[in-house]
Amino acid sequence: MIVMSSTVRAWLKTCLLCLCLACLPQFAFAAEVPPTGLWHIIDNDTGKPEALITIEQRAGSLRGTILKTFPEPGEDPAPRCQLCDGELKDKPAVGLTILWDLKAEDNKHFNGKVLDPETGKIYRCRLTPLANGKEMQLRVYAAVFWEDRKLLRVNE
């Protein structure tokens, strides 16, 4: 049997309590703030919104659809997926599903697919909620490389 003084015992209890309280928000966040709703996709170069998307839960996974685009002056005001293949060829960007099959992994990431409407290419992606559900990181994988995009929640 290990003999501890009451001071050491109290210190250990305090440390354990602090550790539990520090971990609690991470577990609570995963259950309380789903990534569904309206989001702005932020342009990495300008910091301005590129598009407004809605993320919805469907058939056990998440999917994201473009609701509105914010073209820069001189850009096409009604962009289309000109380089897409098959049934997506020349579809308007508005209404296009660009995220799909996003399934939860370890309660803090969602893995799935993303379509880049500018190139027509489909990539693997990972969506990670941040900042208490007010921001998300969209990591797009191309082979061994990746690019991160920021999504900001729109207050509904």
Image (tube, rainbow, N blue to C red):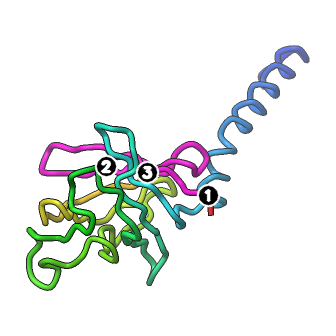
Q: Which residue is mark 1?
A: 155
Structural distance between the alpha carbons of marks 3 and 2: 11 Å
Measured along the vertical axis of the image, is residue 124 above or below residue 83?
above
Q: CA distance from mark 2 to mark 1?
A: 23 Å
Image quarter in which the C terminus is found: bottom right
Report the span colored magenta: 129-154
Q: Tell me which residue sits at (46%, 69%) in the image.
A: 54
Name the main secondary structure of what is drawn in magenta.
strand
> Does the magenta segment cover residue 135?
yes
Can you give x and y, in whole percent of width and height, for residue 107 in the image? 51, 57
Provide the residue designation for mark 3. 151
Q: Specify whether 91 is left or right of 156.
A: left
Q: Quadrant of residue 69?
A: bottom left
State which quarter of the image contains the N terminus: top right
- Who is closer to the viewer here, 122 or 108? 122
- Callout 3 touching callout 2 (CB < 8 Å): no
Identity, as a three-letter code, of the amino acid under mark 3? Leu
Residue at image coords 33%, 67%:
99
Q: Quadrant of residue 11?
A: top right
Asked if labels 1 and 3 touch by Cβ distance under 8 angstroms, the answer is no
**Residue 139 marker:** 2
